[in-house]
Image (cartoon, rainbow, N blue to C red):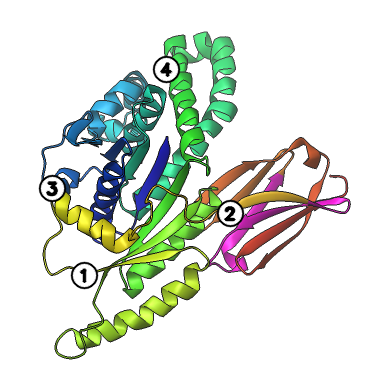
Amino acid sequence: MRVLLYTGKGGVGKTTVAAATAVRCARMGYRTLVISTDAAHSLGDSLDIAVGETPTETAPNLWAQEVNALTELETHWERIHTYLIRLFSSQGIDDVVAEELATPPGMEEVASLMWVKKHKASGKFDVLVIDCAPTGETLQLLAFPDIARWYLNKIFPLQRKVMKVAGPVIQPLFAIPLPGDEIYGDLENLLVDLDAMKHIIGDPKNCTVRIVLNLEKMVIKEAQRAFTYLSLYDYLTDLVVVNRVLPDEITDGYFAAWRKSQKKYASLVEKAFSPIPILESKLFDHEITGLENLDALAGAVFGERDPAQIFYKTQPQKIVKNGKNYELHLQLPFIGKDDIDLTHREGELYVTVGAYKREISLPRALNGKKVTKAKLKEGVLRIVFSGAST
């Protein structure tokens, strides 16, 4: 199943471009599902068709789905959520605040994306087009499985051992509700599902990310940051779509200055994202809703190309051997060396860029070696492992 993740700053036309891609894929014969994980759904408005919480057939080969995040949250998180509320309340936290604290940021979107695993298992669709939430929420979403896995591997097994030994003593003294085996079971099932979902969307042979932007300074800057963080988490961006470009025939009048500004920023986008392909769509003189208008937009963006193809292939992360040393190469464009922080422990490397931190599990070949050098050059961080660790 080919998976296309569309993201971008709010208001750039991300949902419209995602819907247009799905319409064109369906008309090319692919069994296509377009699914919205954005809490503020507008997919149905774009298609101009009522869309349900489960796949709704809207045209030949085309289905659409607007996921109800609350329903998915109850399905995957309810018992853990109830326990955490009890835990926080037992410590004197207000019930309303406890309710908020019991749901980690991004969990709603993550629960929505669980449908990816279901659709993969069903084998019903050839192409899955995902209209993600705006950039910040999408990055949080893609980072969540790594964070959740860390909790499973590092905290909960230890906590479980402690609770089995000390629980009978702790609970009477502090009135702390202890998690039972069913809570740990739910947690492990949740994280297994998260891991399976990450395996699907983290496979560059089948899943790629597409960034939609407009030719405006703030939008481009956010797109650049998104591209950096996507690379940090090892997601392949295969296409940049520049939406709402003013046509060349506009040479004077009110829009002339705007067109001049767009030309300047188009050059910046070309330089910043090269060699990733950049496709453009003009600003239409009418609203893009309904299947025919969406297909026209797809034609403007893709021409005769297959929207489901992978437009660019690279490895955001790879390890190479250089003599007796090993080098981890990590693509981190648009940042300076002062923006990066590295922490190395046996078998693990922690890379922090801005507000985002990623744990990279290292291969056994690097056991006993330590980080001796790190250099950022032309958007690639090269981390050298050599010698014996001390």
Which residue is at the far top?
168
Q: Are marks 1 and 2 in contact (CB under 8 Å)?
A: no
- 1 or 2: tag closer to the N-terminus: 1
Neighbours of disc 4 within 10 Å: few (<14), some (14-19), many (20+): some
Give the labeled residue for mark 1.
283
Foreground: disc 4 or disc 1: 1
| Residue 263, x across and y down, in percent | 34, 82
Q: Of residues 46 and 112, which is closer to you in this image?
A: 46
Q: Of residues 344 and 216, which is closer to you in this image?
A: 216
Which residue shows up at 55% across the image and 64% down it? 333
Circle 3: element type: helix
Separation of disc 1 and disc 2 at Cα? Answer: 31 Å
Q: From the image, which quarter does the N terminus lie in?
A: top left
Circle 1: element type: loop
| Residue 111, x across and y down, in percent | 34, 31
| Residue 72, x across and y down, in percent | 28, 27
- 3 or 2: tag closer to the N-terminus: 3
Write down the quadrant of residue 44 in the picture. top left
Give the labeled residue for mark 4.
186
The boundaries of the magenta stretch are 321-344
> Can residue 311 be seen?
yes
Which residue shows up at 34% across the image and 71% down it? 218
Separation of disc 2 and disc 4 at Cα? Answer: 37 Å
Give the labeled residue for mark 3.
45
| Residue 130, x across and y down, in percent | 33, 43
Q: Are marks 4 and 1 in contact (CB under 8 Å)?
A: no
- Under mark 2, the amino acid is Thr
Q: From the image, which quarter does the C terminus lie in?
A: top right
